[in-house]
Image (cartoon, rainbow, N blue to C red):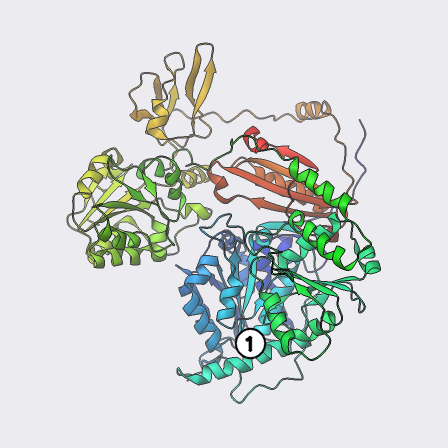
Amino acid sequence: MPLLQETKIDAYNLEDCYTRQEGRIYLTGTQALVRIALAQAQMDRRDGLGTAGFISGYRGSPLGGFDQALWRAKAHLQDSKIEFLPAINEDLAATAVLGSQQVETDPDKTVEGVFSLWYGKGPGVDRSGDALKHGNAYGSSPHGGVLVIAGDDHGCVSSSMSHQSDVAFMAWFMPTLNPANIAEYLEFGLYGLALSRFSGMWVGFKAISETVESAASVDLKPLPSFRKPTDFEAPAGGLHYRWPDFPGPQIEERMVAKIEAVKAFARANPIDRAIYSLPQARFGFITTGKAHHDLMEALSLLGVDSAKAKSLGIDIYKVGMVWPIETEGLRHFLAEKEEVLVVEEKRGIIESQLKEFLYDYPGAKPKRMVGKYDEQGTPLIPWIGELSPSLLAPIVAQRLSKVFTGISFNDQLGFIEHTQNAIAAPGGVRRVPYFCSGCPHNTSTKVPEGSHALAGIGCHFMASWMNRETDSLIQMGGEGVNWAAKSKFTGQGHIFQNLGEGTYFHSGSMAIRQAIAAGANITYKILFNDAVAMTGGQPVDGKITVPRIAHQTWAEGAKRIVIVSDEPEKYQHTNAFPQGVTIHHRDELDSVQRQLREIEGVTILIYDQICATEKRRKLKRGTYPAPSKHVFINDLVCEGCGDCSDQSNCLSVVPLETEFGRKRRIDPFSCNTDYSCLKGFCPSFVTVTGGHLKSAPVLTKTLEIDRRLHTLPFPVLPDLASPYNLLVGGVGGTGIITLGALITMAVHLEGKGASVLDFMGFAQKGGAVMSYIRLSNRPDNLHQVRIDRGMADAALICDMVVGTD
């Protein structure tokens, strides 16, 4: 067997992503956001400033794991005097951030200033508009600064709709930075805080799924220093937060000066750059963010590397701050170009600014500029969905061929078309996300015959594709209010509304208040599972209990409140509830709901059962009592009728092929001891009380492991001179993400380039999960993190259904 060439391995520690100051580190997108704050604290210490830091926001994909990364980095944050406040919703987080900028003008301050990070996904940006607009208008402090991190889901992968927050930022006159990869997170984040300090503006920062949910090897750069512009003088009174500053036109007037300060800072500290700096280039591309790497990969597919681009006369201008556009550097780039193609994902923000600027500009202009539409008004680069190299390549080839008439891309386009057409659909077979084994929603989302339910934001939304008479979707915090209007114009008398306790605490309590005020006939089923399960199992950001919810909704005017639980006995001897509240076992759910739907007005059903995944985690940690009863199926008695699956809706009830036909069995290693499967009338079930499951068999003898490894064929190592694309696919919860992390970390330790992008969404609920792994000898060879359609060099398939999809 050939031996691996001995490779020097980096002595890397997982905490090095925060502590290492030079060389290379391996960073996830969320860790990069944490490091921005740590680096700012370090810069302030270097510059002799006695500042502190503050971070607040609300989770949501693609920023679903940011709060968890902050909690894991708690010791580093404390050492850097950075406070983390997980807010109950996004707009209150923005208000808290505004408070951090008021510290510097307070005579009782204990620090010189507070730099702050706000975070929220696209819908959180939308709902926080008033708070963010006020914060930006009133301003940052000279030794503070605010970075507004927007988690944008351009492809609507894990959201109710796609978002492009830079459009909202523009409406509030908020400068916006668009980093293209994780390495630029560090550079752009520190740039944004410095810009905020100088201009008095809050600064937007785009964190799209493609970057923030990826991980990569990053070369660390020295901490920067920023130049103070010499061509700008602030007006009397300055640009920053002050008091008194009563409502009036002076705030809007100061905004004009702030925008000029932003442009001056950008001139003194350019964040835009020309890739090749070819003054005589005939063709120019203008890009930003992810679209830049899409373009670079598209050019690579067309065989246009840096040498060919320079020989033809092609240059690329990468924009870092998408609004307000810095025109000084662009003016030099645009001059005398025969054509300029603006490549940006979603709406054309840069293109519209450039055309407005060029309309009245008296100097040399490009002969033609196209982007979302060509010179004939025909759609060119889509403004919906996401861009990809294979989508851009034909567009780029067409535009280049108009200017460089002697070149042809037929061979390259033929190859791209062949790879796209080679992908065959498997006939509709796919992994559909589903409730985890033992999930409380398996029972709680059921409605009585003749009733209907409305879905909401949360894991329970999956009931809408499970034949449970559940449909509709509304923004977070609006649950049931649509019914308050709709019910006035339909013949339906009553509706059930599912509402998670995390959403209730975030904003859903106001929806209940509105429904009561409107006199709606609705039952809110508040699903209390002790975790914000859809985003990773975080605790609710505040003190919330079943009795507190009961008291609050009773005080608001609910007509009837009932508690349903798998453990009702824990409430039998308590006086913690308001008078009239009744306690029921979950087996009574159907009859209880039938009673509630007959009551006029708003009624409340609080369904209390711990999240199955959180229960499993707590069992592993020893913080939850181990179950004393386990369920098994005697396959000799089982007739394979499937009633146990119908009763429980549980994925741990699995088929068993026998010589007598298909039967059922309980998978003991995924079972979360919910016991719903026992509700059916079946003599094949056996319960064992007092026993404990044996651990799954593992290989423990080193010699046995070595013997088995030596029987495996030695792998053919890929040539990493050019990027190597490895696609890993499987089912959520089976280690696909871990596998991707192991491979990329191994490549990182060998000093090579590696990146991984994980697509999860609802995958943790049994759906498909993919890891896009890209490897190369050099990190700068990896233009993007996603593997385009048909471009994988190898696939590591961990589930046959996902593998055929």
Secondary element under disc 1, as helix, strand or loop, is loop
Q: Position of residue 260 (x, y in %)?
A: 59, 80
Q: Is residue 72 above or below residue 246?
A: above
Image quadrant occupied by the C terminus: top right
Residue 565 x/y as whole percent: 27, 39
Q: Residue at x 58, y 51 (%)?
A: 386
The mark tally for this picture is 1
Q: Is residue 543 visible?
A: no
Residue 279 location (% of width, % of height): 80, 69
Quadrant of the image occupied by residue 654? top left
Look at label 1 and name its amino acid: His
Task: Please report the residue visible at 53 percent of the width from the left and 85 percent of the height from the top.
Answer: 238
- Classify residue 543 as left or right of residue 594: right
Nearest the camera: 186 or 338?
338
The residue identified by callout 1 is: 143
Q: Nearer the viewer, residue 367 or 544?
A: 367
Q: Quadrant of the N terminus?
A: top right
Residue 472 placement, left or right of 308: left
